[in-house]
């Protein structure tokens, strides 16, 4: 039962005790960093998701207000808030899916790797809690630099003896969302009709859109290919600069995070044919982690698809991506090992 400081959406009179305990069908989802720029709209959208029965909102600041606010929405999920490290374990216990957007965002002039020093420790601590309280949960890592924070999470789980590579996913969905949008714009199509695979990782040249595999099938001029690749790789920086020091993408990210979390929940439910790109433990290349299309199921990642045929431009991009990825992965592993 909730601890004394824990916030329960809907305190006071209730005849339906089972609902407050999460009795309605659906999945239990925790958001860590729920009061942040991504966390708040993400919490709102997850509260609207019919597959969610219980929604735990955890942050080190401001969770009471966000929880009170979100809990008034007349949707099915029961919302509970958790504030500070002493409530982390209660926030995590029993969760099926944990989404992590905790950590500092970029300011203009910074790379995602410049966030490593602060966010690496945050992700490590949160994953230690997961290993202890919900080692079977599916984990969606949003905190940057994703190319290093996913390897950090894996090392933490390995140390705890609970690493299941199928259950750890770095969220690269925003790259796909952007790629679909920008490609649709060039082709004059509705973005909902467009599917662009984006592989590699989630920073600069590691973001590798496979424009030769766009659906519906089409071809691009060299000029279009270079424009689209550069715009997709620099989409995050475009937002960081427009926000001029107040943060990075939050709204499009919350949208992308929910699109991805919803796919994970449909997989958990046993739906067939759920395929999305994600940064996962992988043997698609010689690197230990790589983003590519994966099939999601009851255990998380059930199948990882090969990259498929690449053209020369993409093969060159792949070599560049792998070089930077290797360094970022190694940096994450070394952080936990040291
Ligand atoms: P923000 O500063 O608005 O929010 C971060 C939240 O994390 C804050 O509420 C803060 O209190 C909380 N937090 C800090 N330390 C914590 C801890 N130890 N435990 C729990 N919560 C903690 O930042 P934001 O704009 O929401 O971005 C969050 C992260 O997501 C950043 O690292 C950013 O770079 C990353 N991001 C990733 C993607 C992606 O595509 N994967 C996209 C956008 C942003
Ligand atoms: C993004 O792609 O928008 C995020 O990774 C945030 C950032 O720093 O660009």
Image: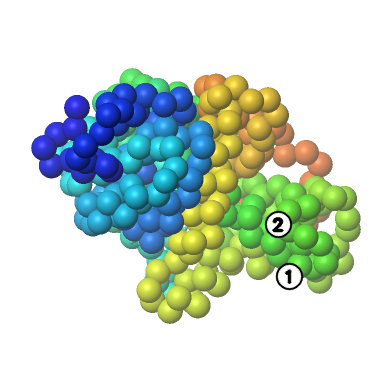
Q: Are marks 1 and 2 in contact (CB under 8 Å)?
A: no
Position of 156 with respect to 264 (left or right) is left
Position of 251 with respect to 181 (left or right) is left
Q: Nearer the viewer, residue 130 or 150?
A: 130
| Residue for badge 1 | 227
Quadrant of res 317 = bottom right
- Residue at 64% of width from left, 52% of height from top? 176
Compared to 16, does 259 lie above or below? below
- Residue at 41% of width from left, 26% of height from top? 24
- Asked which secondary structure carries label 2, the reply is helix
Give residue 243's position: percent from left, percent from top: 45, 76
The quarter of the image holding the C terminus is top left
Give residue 268's position: percent from left, percent from top: 53, 26
Could you classify mark 1 by the number of other residues whose Cα lies within 10 Å: few (under 14), some (14-19), or many (20 or more)?
A: few
Q: Nearer the viewer, residue 260 or 44?
A: 44
- Residue at 41% of width from left, 42% of height from top? 99
Closer to us: mark 1 or mark 2? 2
Asked whether the viewer can see residue 134, the reply is: no
Q: Nearer the viewer, residue 116 or 316?
A: 116
Could you classify mark 2 by the number of other residues whose Cα lies within 10 Å: few (under 14), some (14-19), or many (20 or more)?
A: many
| Residue for badge 2 | 180
Give residue 213's position: percent from left, percent from top: 80, 48
Position of 7 with respect to 182 (left or right) is left
Query: Among all residues in the image, which is located at the extreme left?
Result: 4
The quarter of the image holding the N terminus is top left
Q: Nearer the viewer, residue 314 or 50?
A: 50
Q: CA distance from mark 1 to mark 2?
A: 14 Å
């Amino acid at each position: 039962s909730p601890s004394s400081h824990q916030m329960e959406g809907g305190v006071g009179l209730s005849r339906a005790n089972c609902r407050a305990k999460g009795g309605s069908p659906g999945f239990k989802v925790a958001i860590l960093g729920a009061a942040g720029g991504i966390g708040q709209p993400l919490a709102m959208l997850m509260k609207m998701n019919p597959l969610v029965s219980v929604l735990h909102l955890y942050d080190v600041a401001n969770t009471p207000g966000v929880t009170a606010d979100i809990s008034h929405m007349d949707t099915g999920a029961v919302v509970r808030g958790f504030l500070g490290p002493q409530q982390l374990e209660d926030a995590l216990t029993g969760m099926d899916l944990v989404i992590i957007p905790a950590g500092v965002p970029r300011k203009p002039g910074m790379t995602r790797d410049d966030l490593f020093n602060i966010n690496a420790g945050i992700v490590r601590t949160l994953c230690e809690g997961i290993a202890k309280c919900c080692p079977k949960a599916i984990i969606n890592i949003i905190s940057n630099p994703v190319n290093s924070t996913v390897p950090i999470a894996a090392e933490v789980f390995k140390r705890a003896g609970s690493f299941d590579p199928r259950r750890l996913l770095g969220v690269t969905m925003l790259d796909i969302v952007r790629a679909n949008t920008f490609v649709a714009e060039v082709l004059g199509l509705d973005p909902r009709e467009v599917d662009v695979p984006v592989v590699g990782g989630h920073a600069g040249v590691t973001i590798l859109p496979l424009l030769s595999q766009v659906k519906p099938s089409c071809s691009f001029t060299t000029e279009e290919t270079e424009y689209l690749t550069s715009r997709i790789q620099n989409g995050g920086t475009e937002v960081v600069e427009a926000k001029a020091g107040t943060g990075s993408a939050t709204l499009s990210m919350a949208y992308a995070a929910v699109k991805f979390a919803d796919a994970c929940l449909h997989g958990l439910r046993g739906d067939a044919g759920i395929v999305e790109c994600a940064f996962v433990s992988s043997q698609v290349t010689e690197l230990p982690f790589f983003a590519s299309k994966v099939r999601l199921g009851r255990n998380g990642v059930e199948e990882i698809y090969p990259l498929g045929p690449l053209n020369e431009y993409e093969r060159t991009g792949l070599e560049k991506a792998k070089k930077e990825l290797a360094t970022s992965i190694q940096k994450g592993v070394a952080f936990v090992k040291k």
